[in-house]
Amino acid sequence: MTTPDPAALDPVVLGQRADLMIRTLASISAEPNRLIRGFLTPEHRAAADLVAKWMREAGLEVSEDALGTVRGHLPGEGRKRLLIGSHIDTVIDAGMFDGPLGVIVGILAAGHFAKAGRKLPFGLDVLAFGDEEGSRFPVTLSSSLAVAGHFDTSRLQAMDADGTTFSEVIGQFGKSVADIPLAAYSRDEAAAYIEVHIEQGPVLEYRGQPLGVVTAIAGQTYVNVEFLGEAGHAGTVPMLLRRDALAGAAETVSLAERLARETKGEVVATVGVLRIPNAAGNVIPGNVALIVDIRSGSDTARHKFVEAFKREVRALAERRHLGVTMTDTRNVSVTPCDPALQDGIAKAIAAVGGEPVSLVSGAGHDGMAMAKLCPIAMMFVRCRGGISHNPAEYASPADMGLAAAALIKFIETTNF
Ligand code: HGY
Ligand code: MN
Ligand code: MN
């Protein structure tokens, strides 16, 4: 039995380690002046290699699956394993904490037990997923779905902006599509999945608390809306004779915002992508597409919203003599977090001096995929101004250290 290092449980030391690791990982990007790390890119390769190095240094057995998920394993007494993970891919021009924080805190926690020579009643697996954001392909959660045994091979035909297919990219990454099923855990191995993640919202900061317990992950509907009007000369077509697809899209953006505001917080709706092919200042847009991201902690409220939204879009298209198609490209129900695990996390937060705040996650996470395999739970970490998906994203070393100490406490006080 090696002597436990007293500093190992000191949240200040853990926070400093986490901060250094976060900033080191953040230096791996596709571009020098902003953080971009797409799925199965050279940056993913470099990030995976760095995470694997940290896992080995922490005393974990490292492996990597066919979708580039890096796994650090600490053997326990029995066959069961507690899975601790998050993602190392990013959105474009990202913050450095969204995703990596959960992997790094997992490595620090597992390393604590490895260094102490502690044999836990269950194994620990730290997982670094590479496709949570869906910023390269129009699909998401591929790596965690593969680990959960629910990878849908239709994704292999998805294409990135260069027209390269998902399956081609797997080959370029040095992996084989045939090996994807090997990534899956069997149900009797996976005891639970825990993810530590920045809140990406303002609640913990408002409540003056460093850590929170997630009760559920919001459900999501993505609607691809495409308007078909008539391209025309900007100077010659009278306003009343136009079939302006962009004007229809603009009215749709305001409609989504108005309907969501009317739900008084129950539903949020965002248009983050608007595509105008062959855009030109002197051409009336004839064809415009937009993606509407609709989320809610209540599936009933979300479905009701989508129905009302689509009804009003059809009406405005009619009024404007536009053709319109609406395709749901994502429909994910609310993912509840396991009540017993929530309780364990709340107790661990209290043990490190926090007052556990419970909240719904408006953001999606790999836990949505892992819930198909085993019970899940999430611990949120306060982030400044609730800002995320933005380079101004920030979590303090003190709060990150408390999260690592709370996760260690959770592992020590939980049994499966
Ligand atoms: O969209 C989300 O909520 C996550 O950041 N991918
Ligand atoms: Mn994100
Ligand atoms: Mn995330």
Image: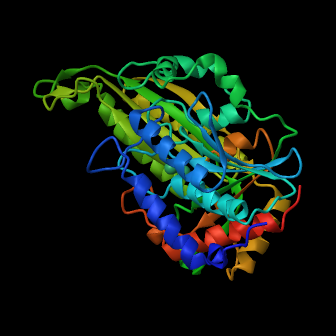
111, above or below 256, in the image? below
Identify the residue shown where x is 70% and y is 65%. Answer: 407
Q: Position of residue 80 (x, y in %)?
A: 85, 46
Instruction: State whether residue 166 appears in this view.
Output: yes
Looking at the image, how many numbered discs can be counted on the residues?
A: 0
Q: Position of residue 133 (x, y in %)?
A: 51, 42
Identify the residue shown where x is 51% and y is 67%. Answer: 17
Q: Position of residue 173 (x, y in %)?
A: 48, 26
Quick one: 388 or 117, which is closer to the camera?
Answer: 117
Instruction: State whether residue 203 appears in this view.
Output: no
Instruction: Please say which color scheme the image uses.
Output: rainbow
Side of 221 relative to 174 (left or right): right
247, above or below 176, in the image? below
Quick one: 291 or 132, which is closer to the camera?
Answer: 132
Quick one: 310 or 44, which is closer to the camera?
Answer: 44
Identify the residue shown where x is 84% and y is 37%. Answer: 187
Quadrant containing the C terminus in the rendered view: bottom right
Identify the residue shown where x is 36% and y is 36%. Answer: 274
Indicate the quadrant where residue 96 lies: bottom left
Q: Position of residue 28 (x, y in %)?
A: 38, 47
Identify the residue at the far left of this view. 235
Quadrant containing the N terminus in the rendered view: bottom right
267, above or below 314, in the image? below
